[in-house]
Image (cartoon, rainbow, N blue to C red):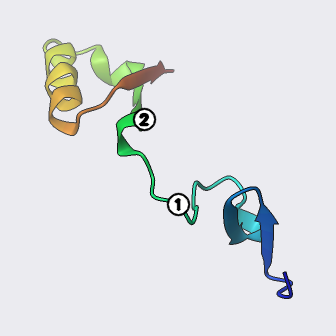
Amino acid sequence: MTSSQVKYSGGKIVPRSDLRVGTTREESNVKNWRKIATWNVRTMLQCGKLEILKMEMARMKIDILGCQK
């Protein structure tokens, strides 16, 4: 690599500051992707909020939901 702005790591070519991103030269396999979301527990204290959360998970196709305080 001649550019100082890009690092070569395996099959990935990404800017030096973004080595965590999944940018590759290969086609990505969408089947393996998972949607992860977080939700504040305090907002679920009201009546009916759990049902709304379930509907939002289905609507947004969320695979994993983390509840946090």
Q: Quadrant of residue 64?
A: top left
Q: Earlier in the sequence, mark 2 or mark 1?
A: 1
Is residue 26 found left or right of 14 in the rendered image? left
Disc 1 is placed on an element classified as loop
Is residue 43 found left or right of 12 in the rendered image? left
Task: Name the residue located 58 percent from the left edge and 54 percent from the top edge.
Answer: 22
User: Outermost residue, bottom direction?
Assistant: 2
Q: CA distance from mark 2 to mark 1?
A: 14 Å
* Residue 34 in view in this figure: no
* Residue 30 in view in this figure: yes
Task: Name the residue located 39 percent from the left edge and 23 percent from the top edge.
Answer: 65
Packing grade of label 2 (10 A; few <14, some 14-19, many >=20) is few
Depicted 29 relative to depicted 15: above or below: above
Identify residue for label 1.
26
Depicted 16 relative to depicted 55: above or below: below
Identify residue for label 2.
32
Disc 2 is placed on an element classified as helix
Q: Amino acid at mark 2?
A: Asn
Relative image position of residue 31 (x, y in whole percent): 35, 37
Relative image position of residue 52 (x, y in whole percent): 15, 24
Residue 40 numbered mark, or none: none
Relative image position of residue 3 (x, y in whole percent): 82, 87
Packing grade of label 1 (10 A; few <14, some 14-19, many >=20) is few
Q: Which residue is at the front of the view, 8 or 60?
A: 8
Depicted 38 relative to depicted 54: above or below: below
Is residue 21 found left or right of 43 in the rendered image? right
Q: Which residue is at the front of the view, 23 or 42?
A: 23
Task: Name the residue located 38 percent from the left edge and 20 percent from the top edge.
Answer: 42
Is residue 17 found left or right of 4 in the rendered image? left
Task: Name the residue located 72 percent from the left edge and 58 percent from the top edge.
Answer: 19
Relative image position of residue 9 (x, y in whole percent): 78, 59
Q: Amino acid at mark 1?
A: Glu
